[in-house]
Image (cartoon, rainbow, N blue to C red):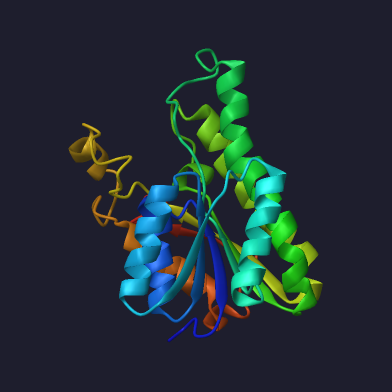
Amino acid sequence: MRLQGKVAIITGAGSGIGRASAIVFAREGAKVVLAGRRTELLTDAADEIQSRGGEAVCHSTDVTQSSQVKDLVRVALDAFGNIDIVYCNAGINPYRTNILDTTEDNWHEVLATNLTGVFLTCKYCLPPMIERKGGSIVVTSSQVGLVAQRDRLTYGTTKGALVSFVKCMALDCAPFNVRVNAVCPGRVQTELTAGRPDWKERSALYPLGLRGTPDDVAHAAVYLASDEAKWVTGVALPVDGGFVLP
């Protein structure tokens, strides 16, 4: 198993890519700490992991609040003794607007979760990793962080900023043997996207077809988190069926 004995914190773990990643990480041997705002979803995911023989705990966490992120770190250390992997997956994409239609409140709401939330998670999870002289941080960016799309002003801004954040973090953390990478998913079939009416139209933009699943992203995150990627840092890895190629 590729993550045998490692302790992994995963934010946004109650649904979609986060839930799939928690299950795949556990299947690969990791002891998983599931974080998110919806306790019932976290509990359900943790129960599924445990029913398959894995180890998991969950903790309700709003990543925009530093006190709650600090509590999450304490829960992980109390439960499993250390932190080897942090997967900053929590994010929101509630608005499809351009700059004229984006309110100031909309702007601050998305930045708080997608940027500040990642900053806080990394800031407070990093010291235990430095103390252990190694670790891996993975961040969920997006295909929209690599190529512009219409009416994605706030989301695209945050996801593009995360690509630069990961590169800066990779340089800063290299002396501590902590690697920092990003996955950049295309549109995958999750609870948030399944009901959208433009699947057929959008599919034409994907050379491999629009058929990605949360598991596809989870497997990419496992690689970046694992020792197989021990010489990989500062990478923004597209997982998007070739969307960014044209």
Residue 194 position within the rendered picture, expressed as x and y whole percent measured from the top left: 24, 41
Where in the figure is residue 14, as x and y percent of width and height?
Answer: 41, 52
Residues 43 and 242: in front is 43
Indicate the quadrant containing the N terminus: top left, top right, bottom left or bottom right: bottom left
Residue 218, picture quadrant: bottom left
Residue in the picture at 31% in, 76% down: 52
Above-or-below relation of 8 to 122: below
Q: Where does the image place residue 70, in percent across and percent down from the top left?
A: 70, 54
Query: Going 54% across and 72% down the picture, which residue do you hit?
Result: 225
Q: Is residue 108 above or below residue 29?
A: above
**In the image: residue 246, left or right of residue 159:** left
Residue positioned most to the top: 100
* Residue at 38 percent of width and 77 percent of height: 27
Q: Is residue 24 left or right of residue 91?
A: left
Vertical comparison of 142 with 177: above or below: above
Residue 207 in percent (x, y) is at 28, 53
- The structure residue drawn at horizontal position 47% and vertical position 42%, both measured from the top left corner, is 144
Residue 211 in view here = yes
Query: Can you say whether 109 is above or below 63 in the image?
Result: above
Q: Within the image, what quadrant is residue 232 found in?
A: bottom right
Q: Give the left or right position of residue 120, taking residue 90 as reference.
A: right
Q: Is residue 217 visible?
A: no
Residue closest to the far left: 200
Q: Residue 6: name its quadrant.
A: bottom right
